Image (spheres, rainbow, N blue to C red):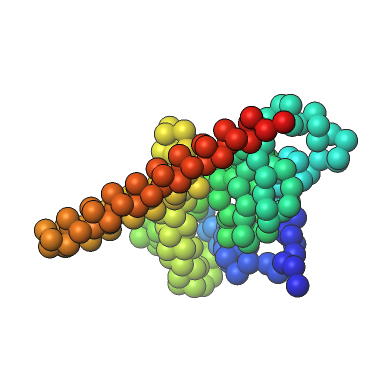
Amino acid sequence: MSKTIRKTGFQLPLNSYQIGSWVINLFNLLMSSVIYMPTLPLGSQIAYGILYYITELAVVILAAVATAIDPSDIFLRSKSKDKDHIECEIGQSICTICNSTVGNLSKHCGVCNKCVDQFDHHCKWLNNCIGLPNYSIFISLLWCLEINTLLLIIFAIILFSEFNNHRSNYSDRVDNHEVYLAFTVLTFIVNILVLVGNTYLITFHSYIKCKGMSTFDFILMRREKKEKEEKKKKNEAKTPSENSLSNENENKKKKKVKDRENQEEIIMGYEDKSP
Ligand SMILES: [Zn+2]
Ligand SMILES: [Zn+2]
């Protein structure tokens, strides 16, 4: 049975990371509306209300759009009549799994089972591939999430200091202030973890952008480097006699390849000359 092709991140089955991100977002929204807003001093309430709900709305919209976009390769997305035109615009190669012509920078995603336009990576949190059609939305989402998370942390700190410095004022505003404080601590811890992970992602994507690489290129480069290091270690562990033997085998292999290339050149020569 052939594997189904995933069009977007909303297509079932959903990913557990994706559900987790929605749960965290809903938790933060609930904490902000029920815990932060009633307990913050009036001035902070207005500032927090405006900044938090704007960034929250941006996070929800950007996450929904990045999940709903189909980042398939341009040849897979376009109707057959447009394909000739695209072929002239960009370089092309063949994907034997999609059984189609695809763009030169497209890569096949095993999870989505399709070639993705300028593939960057498959995002578990959005349950969708990130490629040319949704990469800039993904980066904007990271920045909005960073501001949103920072606000949650800053206002948790304001609440802590309010509780410590003006315990009586704080108690006037809410009845069960211990419960409120416990939830504030929980929100603070959750968002510190989100901030660490998200800051790492922003730093990583800024770094690979400077280097002119995609996440996929970076993973390939690291894998090749690791393989080279392992090979070097293996060679170093070998005795001098083993090394000379393996060099001899390597030279024999190279000679065989060279001979075969020469043979192929000869065959090609005959083919070229044939009528
Ligand atoms: Zn493919
Ligand atoms: Zn994918």
Quarter of the image where one finds residue 10: bottom right
How many labels sit on residues?
Answer: 0
Tell whether 178 sits left or right of 98.
Answer: left
Question: Taking the image as drawn, is residue 35 in sight?
Answer: yes
Query: Residue farthest to the right?
Result: 81
Q: Nearer the viewer, residue 84 or 71?
A: 84
User: In which quadrant of the rendered image does the N terminus lie?
Assistant: bottom right
* Residue drawn at (44%, 49%) of the image: 220
Q: Nearer the viewer, residue 77 or 246?
A: 246
* Residue drawn at (62%, 55%) of the image: 109
Tell whether 211 sits left or right of 270.
Answer: left
Rendered location of residue 83, percent (x, y): 81, 35
Question: Taking the image as drawn, is residue 141 in sight?
Answer: no
Rendered location of residue 140, percent (x, y): 58, 40
> Is the residue 250 above or below the residue 211 in the image?
below
* Residue drawn at (55%, 50%) of the image: 121
* Residue drawn at (31%, 52%) of the image: 252
Rendered location of residue 162, percent (x, y): 41, 55
Q: Nearer the viewer, residue 157 or 68?
A: 68
